[in-house]
Image (spheres, rainbow, N blue to C red):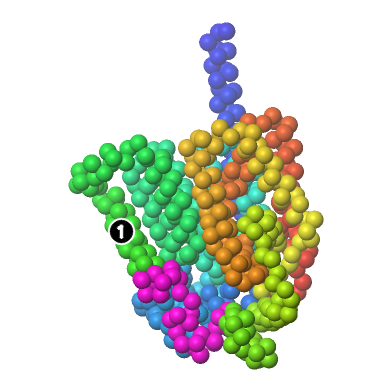
Amino acid sequence: MSNSHRSNRGNDNQAGLCSAAKAEGIFFWIMMACFGVKAMFFALRIRERVFPDEASWYGMVQVFSRSRLLPVDSPESYPLGLITHLPTLYFYLMGKVLAGNFWPIDDLVFLRVVNVVFGVLTVSFAWRLARLMGLSLAVRCLFMVMLTNTVMFTFISGAVNYDNLSTLLAVLSIYYLIRFMQGRSACHLLLSFLFILAGMLTKIVMLPYGLALVLVVFFHERGSLFFFLKSLPSWLAALRWREAAFLALCLAGLAANLTLYGGNKIRFGVLLPSMDKVLPVEDCLKNRLFTRDYVVRQFKAMKLTMLDAQRLALSIRDPGDRATAWNQLAEAEKRKKQAPEKLMGRWQYAVEWVQVIVARTYSVAAHQSIFKYEKDFYPYYAVFVLAALMWFCRFRDLLRPGIGGVGFIVLFYTMILMQGVNYPIYRSSGFSGLALTGRYMFPVLVPLYLLTAHALLSQMPRWWQITVGLAVGIFFVGGEFPWFLRQAGPEWYF
């Protein structure tokens, strides 16, 4: 072959790569714009007291906005719950943002728009993570469609809710973890730790996520840990200003976490105390969630009669929480009259847990809810089961450092949440869906979708990628925003 022919073929290949990169860029911006428009629609159109717990979070942000440093529990904050002894980074930041709202728009809408920005940043860094891990174009496109068309993720992105910040911090931490694994830059490792420490100051569910990330780092660096400890003094002496700044921020974040969680453990015996461990019961009863759980707990302990418990439940202003309290009281009374019902074992509960998580992720679970029919969830199950089977057939691919680390974080976090947190709540309450929502899986939603898309399409024939990719993508798109618009009535909107 002549040199001119080789040159022409090389130019054709380069032109093809440029064309593919351009098409991918257009696809990314289209998906990003669609996600932003949908989240903004929810932010501007959904009326008050629809988004889950937004009234409480908005009230807490207002309390923080009126305080120069950190506020203390007061009669103003009692209806909102504790504002001390819990992770408050989100409320602190949103309070400062709210104090600087000079735009001629309502404070609630302004804060919702800020949360839309968090959601857009999450999607942006999720896309960067997919590219960083070297996943194929087909995998990246399917991943993007799945992420931007998960109805509860898009819905919450338009609300005042700390899940938006914690999800962003989770994605940032894993993004810089992968960058560290590939380039071994100390700055990237420090940034990963900094974002996870900030996440733990935002929401307690980030604790198992952070532990999983640290375990991945230790396993990845297991061969050089002794050398690193030996050379630590010289490394510290040679720090550049940027590394020194990141290290100082990490140490400050670690100190804040130890003060919060360690202080709670020493003083109250738990990482996060219940409201009545900090405040008198009469003050706690001004909070709807405390009252909801308190009346049921006191009735079960036979410290309240059914009539007294129902009267107390009537003081709960939120109709959803009031109905939950009445339902739990009725169930508790029913169980008192019957033989003790056998509780589910861990495996049986795992099946129930997955069903609840799926239902509350791919439907809208809020103070007003729209749930799909059970048969509507079967395709979602099929997608994840097929991906799991394909991972089983290509198990060696999980041994790749990036893929394996991401997989471990998802599995570790999920098992801790399911078996270490939610199962004990079920054992003590008897209600499998209590304190369980799809939003608890948002810290690992991005890595879960990356693994799913990679399993479905990677190393597969082109016809398979096109057929499966289009089928899954169309299903996710149709089951999100168009489905919501068909189901939501006027009562959902301002």
Looking at the picture, tell me which residue is in the foreground, 117 or 431. 431
Looking at the picture, tell me which residue is in the foreground, 258 or 148. 258
The outermost residue toward the top is 1
Is residue 150 visible to us here? Answer: no
Few, some or many residues within 10 Å of mark 1 (<14, 14–19, 20+): some
Q: Is residue 444 magenta?
A: no
Return the x and y of residue 230 as percentages of the image width and height. 23, 41
Return the x and y of residue 188 as percentages of the image width and height. 38, 46
Residue name at image x 28 percent, y 40 percent = 226
Q: Is residue 270 magenta?
A: yes
Is residue 209 visible to us here? Answer: yes
Return the x and y of residue 90 as percentages of the image width and height. 46, 68
86, above or below 163, in the image? below
Question: In the image, is 241 to the left or to the right of 65?
Answer: left
Q: Which residue is mark 1?
A: 251
Question: In the image, is 214 to the left or to the right of 365?
Answer: left
Question: In the image, is 379 to the left or to the right of 399?
Answer: right
Task: Please identify the quadrant where the C terminus is shown.
Answer: bottom right
The outermost residue toward the front is 339
Q: Secondary structure at mark 1?
A: helix
The stretch of residues the image draws in magenta is 263-291
Task: Please identify the quadrant where the N terminus is shown.
Answer: top right
Looking at the picture, tell me which residue is in the foreground, 136 or 42. 136
Residue name at image x 73 percent, y 46 percent = 382
77, above or below 191, in the image? below
Amino acid on which the number 1 mark rests in the picture? Leu
180, above or below 87, in the image? above
Residue name at image x 40 percent, y 59 percent = 197
- Quarter-of-image position of residue 362: bottom right
Return the x and y of residue 205 as percentages of the image width and height. 50, 62
